[in-house]
Image (cartoon, grey):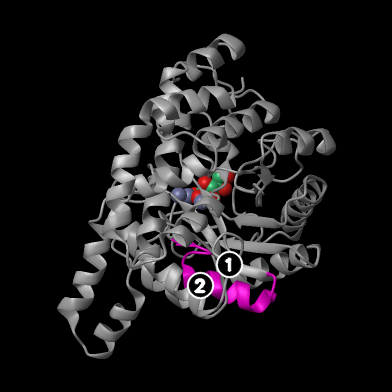
Amino acid sequence: MNIEQNQIEKHNDSLLTAHQRRFAFLQEEWEHVDLESVIQKLVDFQIAIPSWALGTGGTRFGRFAIAGGEPRNIEEKIEDVGLLHALNGSSGAISLHIPWDIPQNAEELRQLASGYGLKFDAMNSNTFQDQAGSAHSYKFGSLQNVNKDVRKQAIEHNIEVIKHGIALGSDALTVWLADGSCFPGQLNFRRAFENTLESLQEIYSALPEDWKMFVEYKAFEPNFYSTTVGDWGQSLLYASKLGKKAYTLVDLGHHLPNANIEQIVALLLMEGKLGGFHFNDSKYGDDDLTAGSIKPYQLFLIFNDLVEGMDAKGMNHARDLGWMIDASHNVKDPLEDLLQSVEAIMIAYAQALLVDRKALSEAQQNNDVAKAQEILQNTFRSDLRALVAEARLRAGAALLPIGLYRYLNVRNTLVNQRGKTSATGL
Ligand code: AOS
Ligand code: ZN
Ligand code: ZN
Ligand code: ZN
């Protein structure tokens, strides 16, 4: 299904007076800053939607179908992201996963995607599951495996993913490895690192000149004693040894409890090695919950360091890092959840854009701790929803994305078109 421009306009008209009142208040509150340039940055900012988050992911214990209407193929996944992008104007890219998505006709998919205003973001490889018909098993790891034939199979898979990505016009490969060990003694850590590095080097050499490789780290799960790309230090080691096209990817849920993610991000950015994000939120581990649903202050602090660091380096906020969501849905309509995640990310970004950098830097220079904290918290506690809504309005999207989604009965339409069974790769 498509959401028509006139449906969006009708919806916006009905909310316009109330919106304008809230926006005018913000304009007054922030009259000392160039709000127009902030709004333009918000309009430009796009967050990629992962193809696997469009259906219900389930838990380790089971899976409960939602009402249905889940996408059954890549075309329908693109259609779903197209719906999100029409509603919020900020979901202009899709991140595919091989082999959960098998692009058959790249040219047709490119056309379909561009019809919705979508690009193909980072491609994701999968060597954490055995695929039907493959010669070797990843039970004891893929790129780290003690058996060279297994490593070779995993390397070739990644190169295959790059080829799919080239055909689709993507320009990045995300490598997340489940490799690690469950028990002491199982692995020689140094050998595992060396094998992984050698394998990554082979994949790296297949990357086109203008591509990036994102090395995603994760503290634990599915392995519970060691993970071969277990933290940002290890990822940074691989990325540094690989070369200038390799970067660290930060998934917010992949740290040990209470890690200071904003500090990690600041230093990776300083080193020119921060590649991008998998946004989500968590209370315990890799919970893959809606961004900003548990720790919105942390999300803001991360963006605060991102904006400061990117500006210090003269980076383009929208283009120079990979912004992606990585989420899993058990109890919510995935599309509604993704709208909520994007909104939370946009709000955190807007807040970070409005931090008084000069005053903060002065407070830091004067060791005025209370003042520094006040500056951050004043901005964080400001309600900037109308600013983000104004950016949506200007982008031709909906003032209230979930409101319009429900008003248009999008899920019911999808159920009628696609049926009640769920058909995701997970
Ligand atoms: C796994 O925990 C990682 O977050 C991955 O980025 C991702 O969830 C997976 O690659 C989906 O394919
Ligand atoms: Zn991830
Ligand atoms: Zn995650
Ligand atoms: Zn994860």
User: Residue 406: x and y, percent?
Assistant: 41, 21
User: Residue 58: x and y, percent?
Assistant: 44, 31
Regarding residue 248, the answer to whether it shows in the image is: yes
Q: Residue 346 versus residue 238: which sits nearer the camera?
A: 346
The residue segment tinted magenta is 226-245
Q: Dividing the picture into quarters, in which one does residue 259 lie? A: bottom left
Q: Give the alpha-carbon distance from disc 1 to disc 2, as whole Å.
A: 7 Å
Q: Is residue 241 magenta?
A: yes
Query: Circle 1 — which element?
Result: loop
Q: Which residue is mark 2?
A: 310
- Disc 1, disc 2: CB below 8 Å? yes
In this view, the residue farthest toward the bottom is 366
Which residue appears at 77% of the width and 53% of the height?
Answer: 162
Query: Circle 2 — which element?
Result: helix
Q: How many marks?
A: 2
Q: Residue 142 versus residue 38: which sits nearer the camera?
A: 38
User: Residue 217: x and y, percent?
Assistant: 51, 61
Q: Which residue is mark 1?
A: 316
Q: Amino acid at mark 1?
A: Asn
Disc marking residue 34: none
Residue 126 to residue 142: above or below:
above
Q: Amino acid at mark 2?
A: Met
Give left or right: position of 104 versus 175: right
Q: Quadrant of the C terminus?
A: top right
For ligand 2, tell me if the residue under mark 1 lies within 8 Å: no
Q: Quadrant of the N terminus?
A: top right
